[in-house]
Every structure is written in structure tokens, then in C-alpha cells.
Image (tube, helix red, strand yellow):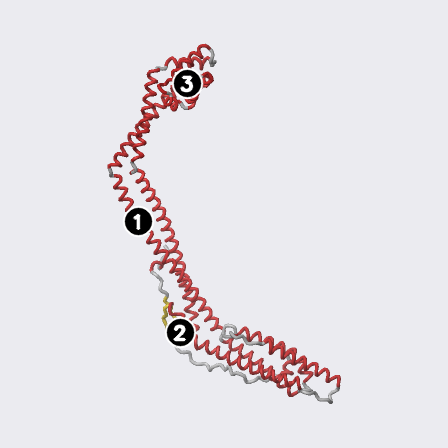
Amino acid sequence: MNFLKKIFGSKKSKIFGFQKSEVEEEPEKREVEINFSELDSWLDNETKPFLEEINTQITESNGKIEEIKNEMQENIGILKNKDINEEIVTGVKKGILDNRVGLTGKLQAFIVSNRIPDDLDYNNASKFYRASLNDLMRVMAISAKYFYIIGPAFEEDAEKLKTNLRELKDTFSNSLNFIESKKEKIVSVKNARKVINDIEEINRRIEGIKKELSETSAELENLEKEDKSIKEESKTLQKSDERALLEKLNYEKEKNEGKLNETEDIITQTISPLKKALVKYERFSTPEENRLVNLYITEPKKAVVLDENTKVLNSMLQNLEFYISKGTIELKDKVKNKTLNQIKQLDKEKLKDLIKNYSELKNKETALNEQISKIDVNEWIEKLERKFDGNQNKKRELNIRQSELKNNAYTLKEKINSEQNNLEKTLENIAECEVKLKNNIEPFISGSSN
């Protein structure tokens, strides 16, 4: 550092004053109330003078930087073409000329590489000036020895270049300091813009919630109207003549089913004791009888319906008694005696009447089912009931969704309140006034989330 001071000196060039204004007594802060919808334009107006001041200073700094670099470019050309004193010893002369080439090349490379971006403004100026200053300090550090060696031969020209470098360094440094002095406010403006965008996005989400709530409310209202219509229609159908007839037929069907079940139990109890014997008899039956014999074993109630006038049953009982008595069908004594007793105790006429009654009950069942199937009132009532139940499920889902939406909206509103509080403080620092924001939110999300 001492070597650099020795080469370049510590004299400061008069580039820009960047004078700090004298401390003035702080005026009383004004108070402003702003609708959020007007905040963007208000912030533009409040920050315009401040940002224009920064951009104006950046423009002036950039103009001075280009001016110095152009002057330095000319001085480099003059130095490159300057003749060296012939009286200087040849070996020393070569060293001086080599260092002149090194110096002019290094300075030329810096000028070429240090290009001011077209979009340079308060957002990125700090980064550019800092990088440029660091690059320049490296160039100056490397160039110091070049200046030291060529100084005695090209003192006047070297001094001009050193002055250019000092002026450039001061301009970069002062420009950077100026931007850094405004950095806190610049960051506040950026943060304010970001928070405004975040709140706008939250407001858009709340608008979406409002829309969905409106749609679900309309759907719930339609479902309520539909439920009312269903109840009225169902009530009308319940009181209709068809409904009365249907209830009568269903009552008769229920009675008939009771008699059927009772008769089926009697038939099963009658045939079941013969089951073991019938299994052995099956191989003696004719092909025509075989199917019915098998049914008498497995499903007696079906068999009696298919056995016309109990023809197969009578033949089967007669043959079964004969084969068991003759020993053709062998059974254990206990089973044999039980089977023969059951056959002898059977009242064939009574059994025939029972089977006939069973057939009549089955026919009545068929007739009742046909009559019931022709009356669609019950089916229509059931359809209405299914529709009503479906509507209740939909309403439950919609009510749950509405509760979720309101909770979401409440959370978003709380987030907006928090963001607005922070934003008001940021805006107060930017505009030096007390700011109160108004962000109108519909009453449906105010208050509690419940």
C-alpha cells in the first residue's frame, strides 16, 4: 500500500462533490391514508425524485468514467509512440521499453474489459462500481512496478496516466459510496415492491375463494330447492291410489310368503327322514324319474312343484317300501325301521293336498310379483329417496368445502394484515411520513375463522 501511495500519490481529484447536505431540523411527519389499489402509483410518485436523483448521478458518473477512459486511451497512445532518450544505456533502455509495453497492454486491457452495462441503474450500479473498483485496484497494483521502471524515461507521460488512474479510482469509489449511502432506501423500495406484489397475489387468491364460495352457495341453494321439490313429490306419491294398492299387494305378498315358508318347512320335514334311503334308491329309478328323485333328495320344495300330481313321489314311496322290505336297499336297522314307519304314516292324500296348496301359493306369489312390478310408484319413490340421500352427501361435502375456504381466506387475511403492518413501516422510512393502508376485504372473511 505504501508503495502504491509512493507511485500514485494520495492526492484526491475533484471529480464529484457528493457533498452531504447540512443537518436540518427534522420536520413533523405528515400522515397519509392510502387505498391499497392506489399504492403502486403513490409509491411511484414518492420514490420518483429519489430514484431520479440516483439515476442522474449514475449517468453523470458514467459520463465521467468514459471521459477519463478516453483521455487515458489517448495518453496510452502518446506513451506508446514516445521516443526514448538515446543516451540511456542499451540494457536499461530495453528494460524500460519492455515495461512500457507491459504497462500500456495492461491499461488497454482494462479499458476494453470495463464496459458500462446499457441497463445500469440503481438496481445494479453498486455491483458494477464495486467490481470495477476491485479490477482497477488490481491493475494499479500490477502497474506500480511498470511506472517505477519507466518513470525516469517517461516521467510526464507516466504522470498523466497515473492521474487518469487516480481519477478513475476516485470516480468508482465515490460512485460506489454514493450508491451505498442510498442502499438502505433502495432495498426498502425493492422490498416494498415485493410485498405489494405478494399482497396483490394474496388478494387474487381471496378473489378466487370468494368466487368459489359464491358458486358453492348457489349450488347449496339449488340443492335445497331440489330437496324441497323431492319431498313434495314424494309426499304426493305416498298419498296416491297406486301407492295404496302397492301397500295392499305388498301386505298380501308378505302373508303369502309366510304361508309358503310354513308349507316348505312341512314338505322338508316330511321328505328329510327318507333322504338316506332315497340316495340308495336313486340308482333304481328310471331315467325319467332320476332328475326328480335327485331334487327330492336335495331340494324337496322344487321337486313337489315339478312333480305333476305327485306321480313320481307316489311311485318312489311305493317302490322304496318294497325295496327296503325285500332287502334290495340295505339300511341299518334303526334307519330302516324309521324309514318304513315314515312311509306307512304318510297320509298320501293329505300330502297331495299340501303339495297342491304349495303350488297354489307359488302361483299366487308369481301373480303378486307381476302386479307389483307393473306399479312403478314405489320404484319412483325409491328413486326420489336415492336422489335425496345423494343431495345430502353433496351438501355435506359443499359445507365442508365452504368451511375450508373460509378458514383459508381467514388465514390469508391474517397474512395480509401482517404484511401490511410491515409494509407501512417500510413505506414510512421511504416517504418519511406515517402511512395507513386500507385493503378492503369482504366481510365473509372478517372476524373468526369459525
Residue 224 x/y as whole percent: 30, 49
Image height check: is 9 above or below 207? below
N-terminal of the pair, mark 3 or mark 2, is 3
Q: Dot 2 surroundings within 10 Å: few (below 14), some, or many (20 or more)?
A: some
Check disc 1 and report the residue beneath it: 224
Image height check: is 229 above or below 4? above
Secondary structure under badge 3?
Answer: helix
Residue 420 x/y as whole percent: 41, 66
Closer to us: 234 or 157: 234
* Quadrant containing the N terminus in the rendered view: bottom right
Check disc 3 and report the residue beneath it: 273
Q: Which mark is residue 433?
A: 2
User: At label 2, which amino acid type do we have?
Assistant: Cys
* Quadrant containing the C terminus in the rendered view: bottom left
Single out the mark in the foreground, 3 or 2: 3
N-terminal of the pair, mark 1 or mark 2, is 1
Residue 194 x/y as whole percent: 45, 67
Alpha carbon distance from label 3 to label 2 = 107 Å
